[in-house]
Amino acid sequence: MLVLAHWDTRPWGDQDAFNKKTLIDGADDGGSGIGVMIELARQFKLKHPAVGVDLLFNDVEDYGVSEVEDSYCLGTQYWAKNPHVKGYKANYGILLDMVGGRGSQFFMEGFSKRDAYQPMKMFWDVANQLGYSQFRYENPQDAAITDDHYYVNTLTGIPTFDIIALQPNGSFVPHWHTANDNMQIIDKNTLKAVGQTLMQVLYVNPMAY
Ligand SMILES: [Zn+2]
């Protein structure tokens, strides 16, 4: 099993209405997924999960420009072409990207549905069984995001889905790539919904799909 998130933060908030060149905190975009993974690592030390889990901390995810193809996710592209173990494989992968924002909803992202629908559906089922109804089965605008999982899927063949906060219209959440992506936007209830579901999947029956 593979769990991954990016630990770099975009060095400028180009979606901000006022401060487009100022360094942003990236508490949600980058920080939240890494926070969940660090807590997972702490839990793994206390009790081993049901399967082996690799935690992958990706760099240089968020330095891209939308006009230039393949300019995002540089660390993942490099890793997928030069894995740490030759021929590295995992049953499936879970990408955490923007998993801590207040009121966040997680719609079924398009590339994830295309390449990793079964494990994603299982994850969403477990989340909803636990009462975390912010995991939504629909994707009203068929939003597909070229995030780290896209390159894991296309370059390694490991089916990987993305847990990423989106709006029902398929847009990123309003604090995305703005100065508002700071600790004020982080809600422990959102982190708990993601983290608790991950724990349930990894410790109880990660292959039940
Ligand atoms: Zn970003």
Image (tube, helix red, strand yellow):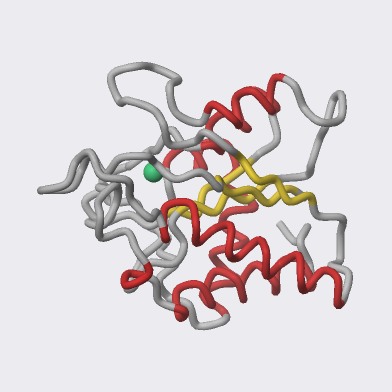
The residue sitting at 56% across, 38% down in the picture is 149
The residue sitting at 51% across, 43% down in the picture is 8
Rendered image quadrant of residue 20 = top left
Left/right of residue 106 with respect to residue 1 in the rendered view:
left
Pick the residue in front: 111 or 208: 111
What is the total number of numbered labels drawn onto the structure image? 0
Pick the residue in front: 125 or 25: 25
The residue sitting at 22% across, 56% down in the picture is 174
**Residue 78: horizontal and vertical position, in percent?**
64, 23
**Residue 97: horizontal and vertical position, in percent?**
48, 52
- Give above or below for 9 relative to 43: above
**Residue 24: horizontal and vertical position, in percent?**
33, 50
**Residue 129: horizontal and vertical position, in percent?**
56, 79
The residue sitting at 85% across, 25% down in the picture is 87
Ligand 1 lies in quarter:
top left
Q: Residue furthest front?
A: 22
Q: Residue furthest top?
A: 68
Pick the residue in front: 55 or 193: 55
- Give above or below for 198 relative to 74: below
Quarter of the picture containing the C terminus is bottom right
Rendered image quadrant of residue 105 = bottom left
